[in-house]
Amino acid sequence: MQYGPIMTASFPILANSAKTDRVAVFVDGDNISADNADGILRRIKSEGSACMLRIYGNAAKAPAWQARPEFQFIHAGTGKNAADILLCVEAMDLAHRRMFDTAIIASSDGDFRHLAFALRALSIRVVGLGENKAPPSFALACTAFNTLESRKQDAPNKNNMGLTEEVVTGLVHSVIKINSKGGRGITLKVLNDEMKREHGVSLTSLGAKTWRAFLKRYPELFAIDPSVPGDAERSTPMVRFLPEGFALRT
């Protein structure tokens, strides 16, 4: 089994923390919603300096987590309990190498109590983060446990996959950036195929009939260039992202 790359640098967002404990964050991305991302980050600040922030899950089912750049998303595969198993294996491997002092386990799955006990046996502080449904057995196995309060966006700004408009447009931006050649952008067909393949996002889930119709909702973010007769490289309309539009989001 291949482990994800070890991230050892402290994250700027947490740089003002007064504590010096090295904090490793392990998120069960198949169990905890990305709506809780900000709550997890707030908790890290009170524990120390994050040396790794990892999310484990099925990439096809977690586009919202992948759109959070503060976290390192690790694709665990599509098998049952694949995310849980990989999270536990990597957490124990890193613990035996003394890569962190405090572990934050974000999940509402009671099975992680075994990991909590194993880490505490190595004199590692374990902080559990979970929703109200988290069983007491997991909470009691941790050194400390906190309940996450979801920070969901208002329903009108979401599609039927539960993704905010900002997340979806961010994913489109990423697909165009990766697949564009020479700044010309990509075809709408490539966009459609890559959004399905990489992020599990389809037009049906967005409530739009065509990608053209969807992208026209955001003229400040995207431009669709018409086809050019006689030009083999521009024989079909191409979509580009507008850097200045995305710059306003930062």
Image (tube, rainbow, N blue to C red):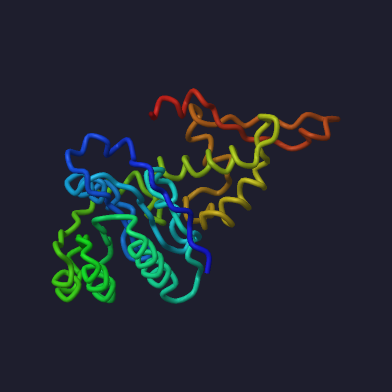
Seen at 64% across and 42% down, the residue is: 179
Q: Nearer the viewer, residue 155 or 174?
A: 174
Q: Is residue 34 left or right of residue 145?
A: right
Camera-side residue of 38 and 61: 38
Rendering quarter of residue 85: bottom left
Q: Quadrant of the C terminus?
A: top left
Can the viewer see residue 130 in this picture?
Answer: no
The residue lying furthest to the top in this view is: 244
- Look at the picture and state if 105 lies above or below 121: above
Position of 14 compared to 64: left or right? left
User: Could you tell me residue 162's position as x and y percent?
Assistant: 37, 54
Residue farthest to the right?
Answer: 230
Q: At 38% from the left edge and 42% from the top edge, which residue is drawn?
A: 9
Is residue 248 toward the left or the right of residue 117 in the image?
A: right
Residue 208 placement (x, y as % from top left): 51, 48
Q: Tell me residue 159's x, y (percent).
A: 40, 51
Where does residue 16 sit, x and y in percent of width and height? 22, 34
